[in-house]
Amino acid sequence: MSKNRGFTLIELVIVVAIVAILAAIALPSFLSQIRKSRRSEAQGAMQSAALGEERVRADCTTYVNASVAADWTTAPTGCASTVTLGGNPYTSAYYTLTITGSSGTAYTVNATAIAGKSQVNDTAYGTPCSTLTYAYSAGVITKTPTDCWAK
């Protein structure tokens, strides 16, 4: 008698079910890690923008009002004529960054998740992270929401 070699339909269904269960468990965790890395990229851009504001303030009497879409080509009022700001390098693929220099002692960098991207669903410890804020005022740095900035 010859023996048939190969898989039965039942064995194949069991293997497919196991793979589907593993994928259902792993995919949400993977997407969460992707969102966390994109948030870190935006936070790095925000902190770079804050450093840019400090460089401008070192030469000027105020901070820059700008957004990612705007070039930093016009120096704020009170700057020496030799200050060259150049183009705004602070960008993020998943967040829109806006930079507001409200006075000579304060500025705020906001990052808002771009609509239609998966980043709008980003959370940390149950706190939504679709809007991040880095604010400097009179020597105090505030990063909100706090859970989104935690390592």
Image (cartoon, helix red, strand yellow):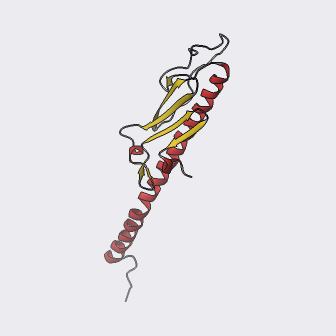
As displayed, is residue 133 above or below residue 101? below
Picture residue at 39% right of the left edge, 85% below the top: 3
Question: The N terminus is located in which quarter?
Answer: bottom left
Q: Is residue 26 left or right of residue 60?
A: left
Picture residue at 49% right of the left edge, 38% below the top: 133
Residue furthest top as drawn: 81
Picture residue at 36% right of the left edge, 68% below the top: 16
As displayed, is residue 19 above or below residue 82? below
Spot occupied by residue 117 in the image (x, y as percentages of width and height): 39, 41
Spot occupied by residue 151 in the image (x, y as percentages of width and height): 57, 52
Residue furthest bottom as drawn: 1
Q: Is residue 13 left or right of residue 49?
A: left
- Taking depth in this image into account, of 82 and 90 the one nearest to the observer is 82
Spot occupied by residue 121 in the image (x, y as percentages of width and height): 38, 48
- Taking depth in this image into account, of 107 and 8 the one nearest to the observer is 107
Spot occupied by residue 100 in the image (x, y as percentages of width and height): 50, 26
Instruction: Residue 13: name its quadrant.
Output: bottom left
As displayed, is residue 66 above or below residue 92? above
Picture residue at 42% right of the left edge, 44% below the top: 119
Q: Is residue 60 left or right of residue 148?
A: right
Instruction: Residue 81: name its quadrant.
Output: top right
Residue furthest front as drawn: 138
Could you tell me how many numbered marks the image carries?
Answer: 0
